[in-house]
Amino acid sequence: MAWDTFATVAETRRALEQKQVSAVELATHYLDRAEALNPTLNTFITIDREKTLAEARLADQQRAAGSAAPLLGVPIAHKDIYLIDGWRTTCGSRMLENFVAPYTATVIEYMRAAGVVTLGKLNMDEFAMGSSNENSYFGSVKNPWDFSRVPGGSSGGSAAAVAAGLAPGSTGTDTGGSIRQPAMFCNLTGLKPTYGICSRYGIVAFASSLDQAGPFAQTAEDCALLLNAMAGFDPHDATSLDRPREDYTRALSAPVTGGKPLAGVRIGLPREFFDDGVAPGVTRAVLAAIEVYRSLGATTVDISLPNVKYAVPAYYVVAPAEASSNLSRFDGARYGHRAEQYDDLLDMYKKSRAEGFGAEVKRRILIGTYVLSHGYYDAYYLQAGKLRRLIAEDFKRAYEVCDVVMGPTAPEGAYPLGSASDDPVKMYLGDIFTVSANLTGQPALSHPCGLDEHGQAVGLQIIGNYLDEARMLNVAHQFQQATAWHRRHPAL
Ligand code: GLN
């Protein structure tokens, strides 16, 4: 079977529907390719041929029996933060190196109900903490475009898998940019939905008020198809939005009125996203893309988000605070790694956590415990909460004059492995454009829009108002109808 390994989710689905290919053939193709390339890219933590092929066989049987599930037989790989019953789920940590999930995350259940076949579990920064995928206990993921560069993090495996043609689509999670930033570094489209759209149940918790599940794919259309499968109310998640399901592809096929496809769309360009902290090649590519948007009928308006300068400091108080609390469950007794030698209970906790967690995770636990401690809570955590509200108010004002906000996804493109890994603050500053959407809960996506001065992919970020995913996906889709940046593939 000759299969185009860079087929989109939409194309894969069509080929399955038209019986040009079977789910088993597809699963076999991608498993073979993953096994061949994993020694180079280190994208997967777990590949389990038997489990994947069993799911694929079931999908083929269901099709033969007349099922028309929307993604029946489409193989998708998942970030190793999603619990899947019977699958090892490591979260990129030694702490969970041998943990086999006893139940399945709701997002995965919903995807399975839509017919998705699980292709395996993808490498990631330990407990999703990082921006370069250099914090994984299982080693760094390589950027498929240039093996000497980072793929971005924390969902680096999710981005590298799709970019390398090891899967038509993948899942990630985004707490401060971990879908959008690796999507940029690997030349993909990635979406962080509105907080509460996708259930957090069965996803290992990092910072619960910020964590969101979302898709990676080559196109905005594919992200819409995947989000259709992932989203939905879940009574197991207290912050899940109880609302009817929607079709995120609906705007993509809406008839164009008035000639230009984006006529009437107002794009806000925040002054703060175009300052000199951004690599010139990144700014250049984003501004060129804004011109394309103008040619598609959109108008632009200059705006200001004065409080986004506090987003990184606020994020690096809130995220570690919540992480320190969430990670207290890893004590060597209930979950995960336990030290072999210890004197007493306290010593067992200490040694198990000292051995099980890596340096960045320990750093976050220390920061988080500090900012939550008596005497500092008011000075840090409470202040960060206030900043969150101020940032949300900035965006609220912006949406009085624009429909979507655009800017670069990250201040620079994929950088060489090792170049920032010993400087946590430098790494944190790379999150400057992404963390606001997590602090406020707004949806945001990144799509390919050009190359920087080092030939690395540049991502354009679209931030939208709450629950405005359908419009944002259509905006990106129209850009992709007019350009070819998203169709570039590495020679692999
Ligand atoms: N880079 C950010 C961090 O390290 C975001 C990570 C994420 O979104 N999971 O916290």
Image: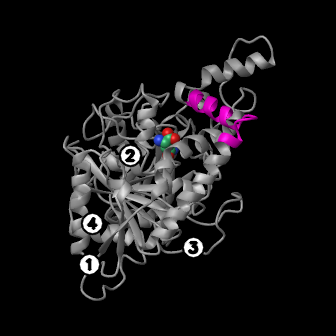
Type of residue at label 3?
Arg
Mark 4 lies within 8 Å of ligand 1 (Cβ measured): no
The quadrant in which residue 327 appears is top right
Q: Secondary structure at mark 3?
A: loop
Give the residue drawn at x 44%, y 72%: 470
Q: Earlier in the sequence, mark 2 or mark 3?
A: 2
Real-space Cα separation, disc 4 to disc 1, in angstroms: 14 Å
Q: Is residue 24 left or right of residue 348?
A: left
Give the residue drawn at x 52%, y 70%: 467
The answer to whether residue 359 shows anywhere in this view is yes
Q: Are marks 2 and 4 in contact (CB under 8 Å)?
A: no
**Rendered image: mark on residue 394:** none
**Rendered image: mark on residue 297:** 1
- Relative depth, front residue between 404 and 80: 404
Q: Residues within 10 Å of mark 4 (few under 14, many from 20)?
A: many
- Relative depth, front residue between 30 and 352: 352
Type of residue at label 2?
Pro
Q: Which residue is mark 2?
A: 182
Q: Earlier in the sequence, mark 2 or mark 1?
A: 2
Q: Which residue is mark 3?
A: 245
Against 174, is 398 above or below?
Answer: below
Q: Is residue 279 left or right of residue 156?
A: left
Q: Secondary structure at mark 1?
A: loop
Q: Give the extent of the magenta segment.
A: 361-379
Against 45, is 286 above or below?
Answer: below
Type of residue at label 1?
Gly
Q: Main secondary structure of the magenta part?
A: helix
Q: Are marks 2 and 1 in contact (CB under 8 Å)?
A: no
**Rendered image: mark on residue 480:** 4
